Image (cartoon, rainbow, N blue to C red):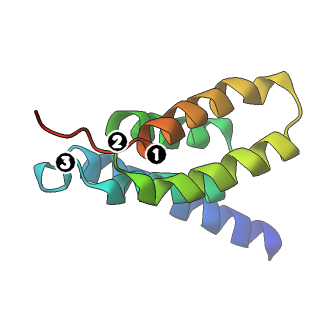
Amino acid sequence: AAAAAADSAATAAVAAMNALEKAAVDDRFQGSPLISLVAAELLKVCHSEEEVTRALEILEETAAPGHRIAVLPLAAWITSEVGRRQGAASWPLVETALYVLVRCAQPVPSSP
């Protein structure tokens, strides 16, 4: 039963990631901080490095100054990731997440 639940959660995460990738390129959602928020929240349910990498790629492409809504979930994921994976393999992912977090935390540039 536990294996079936884990498999179902992994399938749901992949489906959510596919939908998020489509939304990220949809003109109606361009620049929306909600895409960044959903991608950051998806990091919590990603189990494989491939899924984490996909979520971070979406974040890299969509995160922008002013997307502060994504800062807390990103910070929580970074904290748990550093605590969970003390190995060197996790550092490139954490570095990418930190880069995105800083970008999201920046204020929206004022127009001249």
Q: Residue at x 52, y 52 (%)?
A: 71
Q: Which mark is residue 8?
A: none
> Residue 17, percent across and down?
44, 52
Q: Report the quarter where the C terminus lies.
A: top left
Q: Are marks 2 and 3 in contact (CB under 8 Å)?
A: no
Task: Report the side of 21 relative to 30 (left or right).
Answer: right
Count of numbered circles on the image: 3
Task: Classify mark 3: helix, strand or loop.
Answer: loop
Amino acid type at image mark 1 = Ala
Q: Which mark is residue 30?
A: 3
Q: Which mark is residue 65?
A: 2
Which is nearer the N-term, disc 2 or disc 1?
A: 2
Amino acid type at image mark 3 = Gln
In the foreground, 69 or 60: 69
Which is nearer the N-term, disc 1 or disc 3?
A: 3
Q: Residue at x 78, y 66 (%)?
A: 3
Amino acid type at image mark 2 = Pro
Q: Is residue 10 above or below residue 5?
A: above
Q: Residues within 10 Å of mark 2 (few under 14, many from 20)?
A: some
Task: Classify mark 1: helix, strand or loop.
Answer: helix
Q: Report the quarter where the N terminus lies.
A: bottom right
- Give the distance between the C-alpha atoms of the residues marked 2 and 3, in whole angstroms: 14 Å
Check the image and name the residue furthest to the front: 112
Labels 1, 3: front one: 1
- Give the distance between the C-alpha atoms of the residues marked 1 and 3, in whole angstroms: 18 Å
In the foreground, 15 or 29: 29
Corner quadrant of residue 63: top left
Q: Residue at x 34, y 60 (%)?
A: 34
> Can you identify the residue that label 1 sits on?
105
Q: Residue at x 62, y 66 (%)?
A: 9
- Give the distance between the C-alpha atoms of the residues marked 2 and 1, in whole angstroms: 6 Å
Which is nearer the N-term, disc 2 or disc 3?
A: 3
